[in-house]
Image: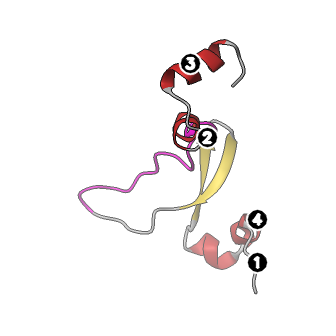
Amino acid sequence: MTEFKISLMYDCPKCKSRNFLDPYSYCYGDVFTQKVMYKMSESPPRLKHVHRPVGSDNEEIYQRVCGLSSDQIREMEAKEVI
């Protein structure tokens, strides 16, 4: 099985010639990511974010998985437990 690493893809002449990867400045530093695969004349492609910020799903997990209420979560945040 072939393992693909972004560093190998970045140095690949084929990927470079096709302009396959783009540098993207993100809150955690600069990263390289695959460009949008499609292009439309009336609405150019854009990349909003590479991935969701760390912790963006915490409240949902606390409620759905841990069974905590919003009040319990706020109380634990106030006490700096979470």
What residue did someone put label 3 on?
A: 74
Q: Is residue 13 left or right of residue 20?
A: right
Q: Report the residue at 53% width, 36% height from top.
A: 63
Along the polypeptide, which appears first: circle 4 or circle 3? 4
- Asked whether residue 45 is drawn in magenta, I would say yes
User: In front here: 50 or 44?
Assistant: 50
Nearer to the camera, 3 or 55? 55
Image height of 30 relative to 22, above or below: above
- Please tell me whether residue 47 is drawn above or below residue 3 in the rendered image: above
* Disc 1 crowd, CA 10 A, few/some/many (<14, 14-19, 20+): few
Check whether the beta carbons of the residues at disc 2 and disc 1 lie within 8 A of each other. Answer: no
Spatial separation of the CA atoms under disc 1 and disc 3? 43 Å
Secondary element at tag 2: strand
Residue 3 numbered tag: 1
**Name of the residue lying farthest toward the left:** 42
In the rendering, at what x and y percent does residue 41 appear?
A: 26, 62
Kind of residue indicated by mark 3: Arg
Q: Residue at x 29, y 64 (%)?
A: 40
**What is the spatial separation of the Cα atoms under label 4 and label 2, in whole angstroms?**
18 Å
Magenta residues span 41-57
Q: Nearer the viewer, residue 52 or 34?
A: 52
Task: Measure the alpha-carbon separation of dots 4 and 3.
Answer: 42 Å
Main SS of residues in magenta: loop
Mark seen at residue 7:
4
Q: Earlier in the sequence, mark 2 or mark 1?
A: 1
Indicate which label's residue lies in the foreground, 4 or 3. Answer: 3
Q: Which mark is residue 26?
A: 2
Crowd band around label 2 with a 10 angstrom C-alpha radius: few (<14), some (14–19), many (20+) = few
Which of pointers 3 and 2 indicates the residue nearer the eye? 3
